[in-house]
Image (tube, rainbow, N blue to C red):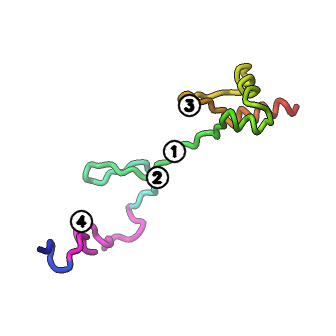
Amino acid sequence: MSRGGAGWQGLAGPGSASQPAERIGVSPGVGAVPVGTVSTASTGRGAPVVRNLVRPVAPPMLTVREVAEELAVCRATVYALLERGELERVWVGRSIRIPAASLDALLARGAR
């Protein structure tokens, strides 16, 4: 038995009320809100729609191994720099991450 008449394939037709193919009588840009300035908009049916959700970019973080490779030292030396406070550390769970800015600051201090 066919649902919705002959040729029904489970998709709404191009002119159905639930999914109109185009808006007739509305010129482009009229009543439009720039997406870049709106984080949520109401659909008129109560449910908010999230648009243009921008996550803040976190500063680049390096592992102890990456810092050791960059400085051409062993990992124990990097841990010693962390203990002395010469490098900043950030705990991510049980892992240590070092902000790239902290490594850059260490290298700038060493270059003087």
Please give the range of residues in magenta. Answer: 8-31
Quadrant housing residue 96: top right
| Front position in the image: 112 or 72 | 72
**78 in magenta:** no
Q: CA distance from mark 4 to mark 1?
A: 32 Å
Give amino acid for label 1: Arg
| Front position in the image: 42 or 14 | 14
Q: CA distance from mark 4 to mark 3?
A: 46 Å
Residue 21 position in % (x across, y down): 31, 72
* 22 sits left or right of 62 in the view: left
Give amino acid for label 3: Val
Q: Which residue is mark 1?
A: 55
* 86 sits left or right of 42 in the view: right
**Residue at (42, 52) in percent of width and height:** 51
Q: CA distance from mark 3 to mark 1?
A: 19 Å
Q: Which label's residue is closer to the chain start, 4 or 3?
A: 4
Task: Answer whether labels 1 and 2 touch (C-beta < 8 Å).
Answer: no
Residue 27 position in % (x across, y down): 38, 71
Q: Which residue is mark 2?
A: 52
Task: Answer whether labels 4 and 1 touch (C-beta < 8 Å).
Answer: no
Q: CA distance from mark 3 to mark 2?
A: 28 Å
**Residue at (16, 80) in percent of width and height:** 6
Q: Is residue 106 above or below residue 84?
A: below
Q: Which residue is mark 3?
A: 92
Q: Which residue is mark 4?
A: 18
Q: CA distance from mark 2 to mark 4?
A: 24 Å
Q: CA distance from mark 1 to mark 2?
A: 10 Å
